[in-house]
């Protein structure tokens, strides 16, 4: 008895790639650049540990506080805080300054398009962007445009490294 051949398989769609679990590190060729992608969860334990392992010296505490504030804002005000959302955090270091970039997933559908602003001085002791303003040399932001809608927002904060 001869073995029977398996019927030819019908080509189907390519299987979906396995999602990369959060958090995961970003790889860069530049040695002075490090990055991490966080999920939509608001537990910042991993973020704090990553910053403290990336930034050495006295600037680590300041960078941790600024990163914490910016990631919290991304989770609270954008699609990054929704299931499936994420936040990209990148640190560029040189001997004098450090640039921290936090990129969210953009505004929620139907939301009034927010833009980063300091808010009211009476609300909380140095909360959100007021903390960033207090602890950084400079900060700015830029939107990514997707046709006629706003896409991801990146906030860049520059911190002095003593």
Image (cartoon, rainbow, N blue to C red):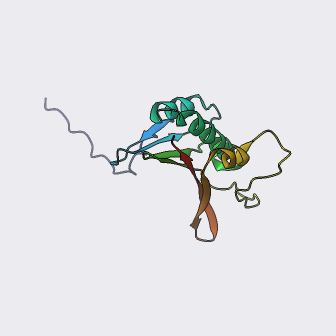
The picture places residue 70, in percent across and down from the top left corner, at: 64, 45
The answer to which image quadrant residue 139 occupies is bottom right
Residue 5 as seen in the image, left or right of residue 125: left
Look at the picture and state if 103 lies above or below 21: below
The residue positioned farthest toward the left in the image shown: 1
Whole-percent x, y for residue 66 in the image: 62, 41
In the image, is 87 to the left or to the right of 134? left
**Residue 129, percent from left and from top:** 70, 48
Q: Quadrant of the N terminus?
A: top left
What's the residue at 51%, 42% (across, down)? 161
Q: Is residue 23 left or right of residue 155?
A: left
Residue projecting furthest to the front? 162
Of residues 98 and 27, which is closer to you in this image?
98
Residue extending farthest right: 122
Q: Relative to the observer, which residue lies in front, 131 or 69?
A: 131
Can residue 83 be spotted in the picture?
A: no
Where does the image place residue 152, in percent across and percent down from the top left?
59, 57
Residue toward you, 101 or 7: 101
Q: Is residue 50 above or below residue 145?
A: above
Q: How many marks?
A: 0
Q: Residue at x 48, y 36 (%)?
A: 55
Q: Is residue 148 visible?
A: yes
Give left or right: position of 159 versus 127: left
């Amino acid at each position: 008895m001869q073995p029977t051949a398996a019927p030819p398989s019908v080509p189907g769609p390519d299987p979906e790639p396995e999602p990369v679990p959060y958090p995961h590190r970003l790889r860069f060729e530049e040695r002075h650049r490090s990055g991490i992608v966080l999920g939509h969860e608001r537990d910042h334990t991993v973020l704090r540990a990553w910053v403290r392992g990336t930034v050495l010296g006295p600037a680590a505490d300041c960078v941790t506080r600024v990163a914490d504030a910016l990631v919290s804002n991304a989770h609270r005000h954008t699609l990054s805080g929704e299931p499936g959302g994420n936040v990209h955090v990148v640190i560029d270091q040189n001997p004098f300054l450090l640039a921290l970039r936090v990129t969210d997933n953009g505004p929620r559908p139907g939301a009034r398009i927010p833009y980063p602003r300091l808010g009211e001085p009476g609300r909380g002791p140095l909360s959100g962007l007021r903390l960033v303003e207090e602890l950084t040399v400079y900060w700015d932001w830029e939107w990514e445009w997707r046709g006629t809608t706003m896409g991801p927002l990146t906030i860049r904060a520059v911190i002095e490294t003593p």
